[in-house]
Image (tube, rainbow, N blue to C red):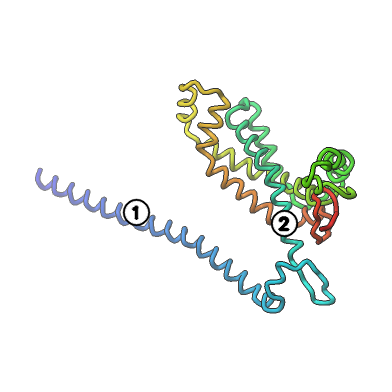
Amino acid sequence: MASDSIAATELTAQQQKASGFGDWVFRAITLVCAFSVLALVVILGMQLYLGSRPTLHAYGWKLFFDSNWNAEAKEYGALPFIYGTLVTSVIALIIAVPLSIATAVYLTDLAPLWLRQPVVSTIEMLAAVPSVIWGLWGIFIMVPWLRLSIFPLLKRYLGPIPVFGQLFQGPIFGIGFLSAGIIVAIMILPIITAVSREILRSVPDLQREAAYALGATRWEVTRIAVLSYARRGLFGAAVLGLGRALGETMAVTMVIGNNPQISKSPVTRWRV
């Protein structure tokens, strides 16, 4: 009996030793994977810096603040491109983030079961549409509709507003920052919706049940127990959408009119 007890103790010690070694290997592998991501970001930043050094050395930092672009005179200014990217991205986020979060809330807590999967599948299919297709659709379908129906209304009702109405003055051509922002909003909507939906699904049911037990309405449950709990994750979803918006070039170039100039109005081509 004593020998059996000693053997069992030795076997247990060997198992614990093997388990400890396996835990150490697993921890080391995951640590390497985590730092490899950071190393990739550092390497990417270094490559961008090294690749841009000749340009910065030749033209200086005024490249980012100059709007003149004349290849014959070797004058290059990136300000219109930076300005257009920021404006279209902000417009896209203003449109897409509330719509995406509202859609995710409906699909998570309010939609009937028979409707959830078809809507989710449709939203996911939108993410697979190439940006060129969105650009062509924007030029031939959306821009004429905006030019004839929506932009005149914006100019009529928002134009008389002091200061703010100045953004809607001038001739309306349909192509511009607002059209590009709407296209980008449609493109980033599936991403933000999908990520937001997964985040809302991860909210514990105890949060909802506790709010209902305290007499909260469905809207109060959604606002207090769900959205407040998942606000950091929803912010991350918006940041992912911002990354996609900043990276879009083809559809924005097509809808914005391929006009690298700073425009004061989002609905016209009225330059500053």
Residue at the image position 88 percent from the left and 48 percent from the top: 172
Quarter holding the N terminus is top left
Residue 22's quadrant in the figure?
bottom left
- According to the image, label 1 marks what residue? 23
Residue 16 locus on image (x, y percent): 26, 51
In this rendering, the label closer to the viewer, 1 or 2 = 2
Graded by Cα atoms within 10 Å as few (under 14), some (14 to 19) or many (20 or more), the crowding at tag 1 reads few
Residue at 85 percent of width and 50 percent of height: 268
- The CA span between labels 1 and 2 is 47 Å
Q: Give the image quarter of residue 50.
A: bottom right
Residue 265, numbered label: none
| Mark 2 element type | helix
Local crowd at mark 2 within 10 Å, few (<14), some, or many (≥20)?
many
Left or right of 177: which side holds 123? left
| Residue plotted at (79% across, 59% down) | 262
The kind of residue on which mark 2 rests is: Thr
The numbered disc on residue 85 is: 2
Is residue 209 depicted above or below 43 in this figure?
Answer: above
The amino acid at mark 1 is: Asp
